[in-house]
Amino acid sequence: MREPIVSQPTPMRTAKNDAAQATPTTGNNQQWIDKAKAHLLQNYKQQPIVLERGLGSRVWDADGREYLDLLGGIATCGLGHCHPEVVAAVRAQLDKLWHTSNVFYSEPQIDLAARLTAASGLQRAFFCNSGAEANEALLKLARKVQKDRGNSERYEVITFDNSFHGRTLATVTATGQTKYQKGFEPLPAGFTHVPYGDLEAVRKAVGPHTAAILVEPIQGEGGVKVAPPGFLKALRSLCDEKGLLLLVDEIQTGMGRTGKVFAYQHEGILPDAISLAKALGNGLPIGAMLCTEEAGKSLAPGTHGSTFGGNLIAAVAANVVIRKVTEPQLLRDVAQKGEYFLTRLRELQSRMPTVIKEARGLGLLIGVELVQDAAPFIAKCRELGMLVNAAGDKTIRFAPAYTVTNDDLDQGVRILERALKS
Ligand SMILES: *Cc1c(COP(=O)(O)O)cnc(C)c1O
């Protein structure tokens, strides 16, 4: 029998944890939450627990309570919390060098660029610190490439209704959801939105100003909506026909999440450029923009940059991630576990058709759309010991670690069923 990808770690027993388990309402969570309410900017709708420790697919709060984490920091901790190889790589780097600035070269960043370009089929890598910044790089790239081709009038990017691309002014404008934009006007020019999956609408939206199309292979924040089969391929053809760049936002879908290293690989296409973040550093902040040799020429010395981008600590973590997620067995596991989980969830749907509208997804990015708002059920799941979140108003999102076990997934389905019946 083959080895599991990573053995499911057993929780560490500590005196503190045991004591906390014995008295589950010590109030540690509450004390911290009161302090948070006094000092943190109140820009998030935060679930009322303070997470302190994690291992694999388990996390513990400040009262010592254990949770099954099927959200993984929103599709970020792909290898699970405190994955031993990531921890070892980061520890080793901590004693060597943290940061140099990109006025110098560093080995971990060069290695990472080599691995990501080899895995993607793209030739050039740029590093930043977050998803929004990776998408900013895509948007700047598209404009600059068109300028350099002599098409200065081509600056507009077509994106999709219900998409999510980030919170900076440009990426929130690229985002096809007005709720994220309201109050921040005037928004930057140069974005149009069309219905997701509607090729005819995209074709109609292409005009003399169009520079590029920016698309998520699966709309993550928008409710885990998978693009119709063939859609990315059709966009690729349209971009070739019209001289546009195809930009694929792989921030949530990339790095093994869907059972391929990158989700566009399900369609056998090659984009002009892609953005990565979330799972790239297994929880350390790092983003990347990968592009073709031709496109990359447009971001010549001095045109773009980032102080922390490709920081050595984040880069060594990302090197472990890309090594792991290019193992064919890991990708097969992600695909199999995803299918297993989706099957269990669809069985649950058939038992509760008036509560669950649909279970959908690809690999280990799965959404369960409810008939009602998801928020109260997400709270109930947490009370029952499982962490998930909402994608859109009515969809419960699951983005577990690739190391999750079928037993964990079964437990997740049981907890969800109890929550939905409450
Ligand atoms: C999370 C996400 C972003 C934004 O990433 P940040 O790191 O929060 O800036 C952009 N696009 C997609 C598809 C995402 O899932």
Image (cartoon, rainbow, N blue to C red):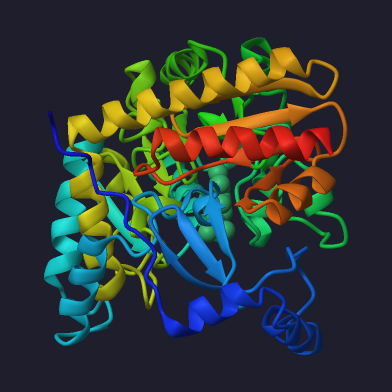
Looking at the picture, tell me which residue is in the foreground, 186 or 4.
Answer: 4
Q: Nearer the viewer, residue 272 or 223?
A: 223
In this image, 53 relative to 44: left or right? left
Of the 4 image quadrants, the one containing the N terminus is top left
Residue 281 location, x and y as percent? 35, 60
Report the residue at 86% width, 55% height from top. 182
Relative vertical location of residue 279 with respect to residue 417 in this rendering, above or below: below
Residue that extends furthest to the front in the rendered view of this protein: 22
Q: Residue at x 25, y 35 (%)?
A: 330
The foreground one among 16 and 34 is 16
In percent of width and height, residue 143 lies at 49, 46
**Image label count:** 0
Relative to residue 399, is residue 111 depicted above or below?
A: below
Question: Can residue 284 be seen in this snapshot?
Answer: yes
**The C terminus: image quadrant:** top right
Q: Residue at x 72, y 23 (%)?
A: 195
**Residue found 36% across the figure and 23% down from its top:** 336
Residue 223 quadrant = top right
Name the side, left or right, on which 136 lies relative to 363: right
Residue 92 vs residue 301: left or right? left
Whether residue 311 is visible to the viewer of this picture, yes or no, is: no
Give x and y (percent) for residue 276.
Answer: 41, 49
Q: Position of residue 321 (x, y in %)?
A: 26, 52
